[in-house]
Amino acid sequence: MPSHPNRGKSTRPGRNPTPAEIKTARESVGLSQARAAEVVFVATRTWEDWESEIVDRRMGPGLWQLFCIKVGLPDPYSG
């Protein structure tokens, strides 16, 4: 799938956030994992996996951007 922002030679800035970035962002706005999951319409377990250093499941760039915008954090991909 070469048109995906994390594959191929795309120059779009999308990238998967690290588990530490996700946790720091969530905590900075005072949300529990359950509430943060509700913000982007995923299961709490999915959010827990995204914050886990052990589980190899990453939040996609689109959901990362959506979360940041919805909770009032700066858009992670605006230059």
Image (spheres, helix red, strand yellow):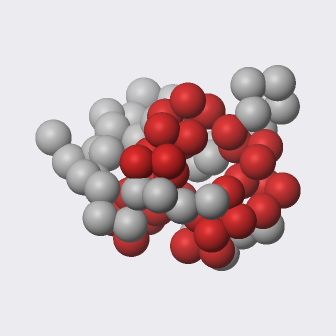
| Quadrant showing the C terminus | top left
In the rendered structure, the answer to whether residue 76 lies left or right of residue 67 reads: left
Furthest toward the left, the residue is 79
Furthest toward the top, the residue is 54
In the rendered structure, the answer to whether residue 74 lies left or right of residue 64 reads: left
In the rendered structure, the answer to whether residue 23 lies left or right of residue 33 reads: left
Q: Quadrant of residue 55?
A: top right
Percent x, y of residue 62: 49, 57
Percent x, y of residue 35: 63, 69
Q: Is residue 3 visible to us here?
A: no
Compared with 5, 8 (above or below) is above
Percent x, y of residue 44: 78, 62
Number of labels in the image equals: 0
Q: Residue at x 82, y 24 (%)?
A: 54
| Quadrant showing the N terminus | top right
Furthest toward the front, the residue is 30
Q: Quadrant of residue 13?
A: top left
Q: Is residue 15 visible to us here?
A: yes
- Residue nearer the viewer, 9 or 72: 72
Percent x, y of residue 29: 41, 57
Q: Residue at x 44, y 64 (%)?
A: 66
Q: Quadrant of residue 45?
A: bottom right
Q: Residue at x 63, y 46 (%)?
A: 59
